[in-house]
Amino acid sequence: MIVGGGAAGIRAAIAAAEISDTLSIALVSKVYPMRSHTVSAEGGAGAAMGADDSPDFHAFDTIRGSDWLADQDAVEAFVAEAPGEIVRLEHWGCPWSREPDGRIAVRAFGGMSVNRTVFAADKTGFHLLHTLFQTSLKYDRIVFYDEFFVTKLLVDDGRCAGVAAFDMRDSEVRCILAKAVILCTGGAGRIFPFTTNAAINTGDGMGLAYRAGVPLKDMEFVQYHPTGLPGTGILMTEASRGEGGLLFNNEGRRFLEDYIPSKMELGPRDILSRAIMQEIEKGHAFEGPYGHYVHLDIRHLGEKTIDTKLFFLRELAKNFIGIDPVHEPIPVRPVVHYMMGGVDTDIMGQTRLAGLYAAGETACVSINGANRLGSNSLTECLVFGARVGRQAAEDALEAVAPPTNLLAELAETEQDRLVGTYLQREGGGERISTIRTDLQTAMERGAGVFRTEESLKEAVEAVSGLRERYSEVAIDDRDRAFNTELVAALELDNMLDVADAVVRSGLERRESRGSHTRRDHEDRDDERFLRHSLAISTAEGAMIEYRDVTITQWPPAERKY
Amino acid sequence: MSGKSVALRVGRYRPEHAAEPYFDEYDVPASNDMVVLDALNYVKDHVDGSLAYRWSCRMGVCGSCGMMVNGVPRLTCSTFLREFRSEPIVVEPLRYFPVIRDLVVDMTDFLEKLRMVKPWIIRGEDKPVEEGEYLQTPDEVDDYKQFSMCINCMLCFSACPVYGQDPEFLGPAVIALAHRYNLDSRDQGRAERQRVLELNNGIWDCTFVGECTVVCPKDVDPAAAIQRSKVSTATRTLRSVVWPFGGRE
């Protein structure tokens, strides 16, 4: 069984389907698969495809980008399998952009030392997701549970045995048994107020695993993408800079020469986001109704290049802010984009709970460490989606079927919980939207681009207080048919768990590394913190433990560009 | 949009409370840069949490938030309140689909039809991944690219009077997707797909109203896909009559 129908989930489903035609594969998702947030990815997918490239170069860039927190064995597997996955998607019909001779084209991206980002114009995620979804329709043994919301992992005798989920059409809980469960539910950007993430990115898989006793790893590392539209947070793809776009402050100066002169606009995201925030602090930014911003200028690329390679960016800028980037610079500011952390897995996607796996943004394998490089996430979904799909399928073929005798009772207990906690609760008075907004405000204030001991302590307090208020949450909607408020309440439950793990992991990491920037601990401290954090659920909130990073061929070094 | 607020008239359907659909009206504080979806979110967050609708990416690419706005199928995340001169702005579920609840329609029919046209690459023999990609020039990509841009938002179904009359009609987006694979230089499945397209309720049902193309938010032009499928079918039929060997391509 796969929970989540984005790139990682569908890739896992197909991989499992190809292992054996005796398997029945359930793909359970709270939205129709083609609505998944993969659809919004723009710039591309990284893989060492070019003649001047090699998997080792890709590995080194990824490890340096991660500020040495990535596990190097995982990165080696990732870069080795990446090109094959790109070709496989090509065989399945993905409309990759091409060189004149018909080969798959590659473009430049931040933090990558050579051109290695394959792309489908600037709608790579959209094409990738629809190609995967359409290809998955070929397999009758993949059964879709569309618009089913998973409320709980079923654990029997120390093994994950399926999920409790309700069909949104009738809010009726079913227990769906499985010999293996793979979580592919994406990220949790919605715990912040200003994010590129879709409404559905509420950390559901992270919450499910965490409450079942699986640690969340490296949760303090939250990626800010340097170029989002003020107000909405809509992403202006990094491909704009890959194709030659430039960033200017309000003095008309390419300010990145003060921060990362060797890479300029092609620097990694954490460094560029910090640079823009510092320009804002210095008063070098423009001021608008939605806060300060700098300019992304692509006018010099010309209309033809923009329309072939950055078509979607132009459409978005024109539609949503009335600016045509062919003629005007685009206002941009850093925006929450990606969770480097997630469900702790090994290199095969296996968690410490037997029968439970994870892949994609939900998981932390980790190849991204303290900062993910642009275009590595789509490829991660493909490589680790495929790996975990194969592994889970092989394990399922060996495993005994979970016991069915408790099913009815389990479903009833979970149904009673939903009814008692949400659908029939009297009194109360906290609105979901109020708690959610307060959570987002607390996260931005306490765990934004720059953090301190004090800001993180305040955020920990705030999140605990919100958890208490959540116990008083009341919903207007008591209907069983498509109750979106019930879904929102359960999503908020997941968001609160994820947020707690983020701020407590951040508080304990008293160093600066990658995206985690502590103003009170400005240096990287390998002696104490060249380690993964593991947030473990307790009654008092997340407890933090550590595990060593796996180093193979690239000893920790200063992160220089 | 008058001054600082806008009146919304929203289609409701709550089968547990009333057998028939009805309307609720809401006044929403509005600004120049708000879209219809923002107004619905305001209602849900602050006024009436029971209003049900789908949305996700709010950037016009996930295809979740299609609704009828003043009688026209639109993506509500990309439809600005400032477009409308008169109030209330009327928001209803997408036309021609069964309604599950409020603004949420049943997509089952669409998904079944999608699978019917086999929207995947069909080849006699697939070459191993180790042998690399199939070469495809930028011009060959351009041949089908437009028809690959469909986000499955289903606005074209709601605009299509033929689908309104005959729910068995395959529908614009589905035919466009079949056409997308037919035009792909890597594909060899045209004959299999064409059999589905030529069945009753396939391409020949389309009366070329062209409304699907008008409402498409991604310029996919399903009407052109349908016409080109008809031409290709007709040509082959004609060839099979005048050529002795059945006019194989």
Image: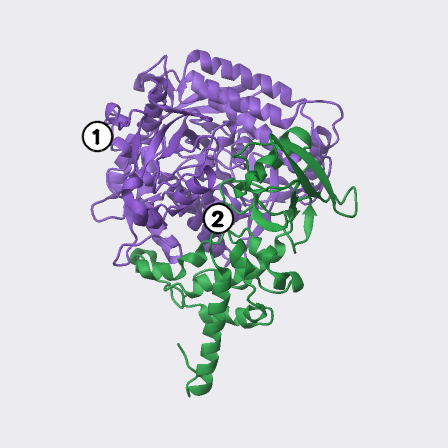
Q: What x and y, as percent, mark residue A55? A: 26, 43
Q: Amino acid at mark 1?
A: Ser
Q: Residue at x 64, y 32 (%)?
A: B28
Q: Residues within 10 Å of mark 1 (few under 14, many from 20)?
A: few
Dividing the image into 4 quarters, which one contains the C terminus of chain A? top left
Q: Which of the two discs, 1 and 2, labels the residue nearer the N terminus?
A: 2
Q: Residues within 10 Å of mark 2 (few under 14, many from 20)?
A: many
Residue found at the very far right of the displayed protein: B18
The residue at which mark 1 appears reads as A262
- The chain drawn in green is B
Q: Residue at x 30, y 60 (%)?
A: B137
Q: Quadrant of residue A299?
A: top left
Dividing the image into 4 quarters, which one contains the N terminus of chain A? top right
Provide the secondary structure element on which disc 2 rests.
helix
Q: Chain A drawn in what color?
A: purple
The residue at which mark 2 appears reads as A10
Q: Nearer the viewer, mark 1 or mark 2?
A: 1
Chain assignment, label 2: A
Q: Amino acid at mark 2?
A: Ile
Provide the secondary structure element on which disc 1 rests.
loop
Q: Residue at x 36, y 18 (%)?
A: A281
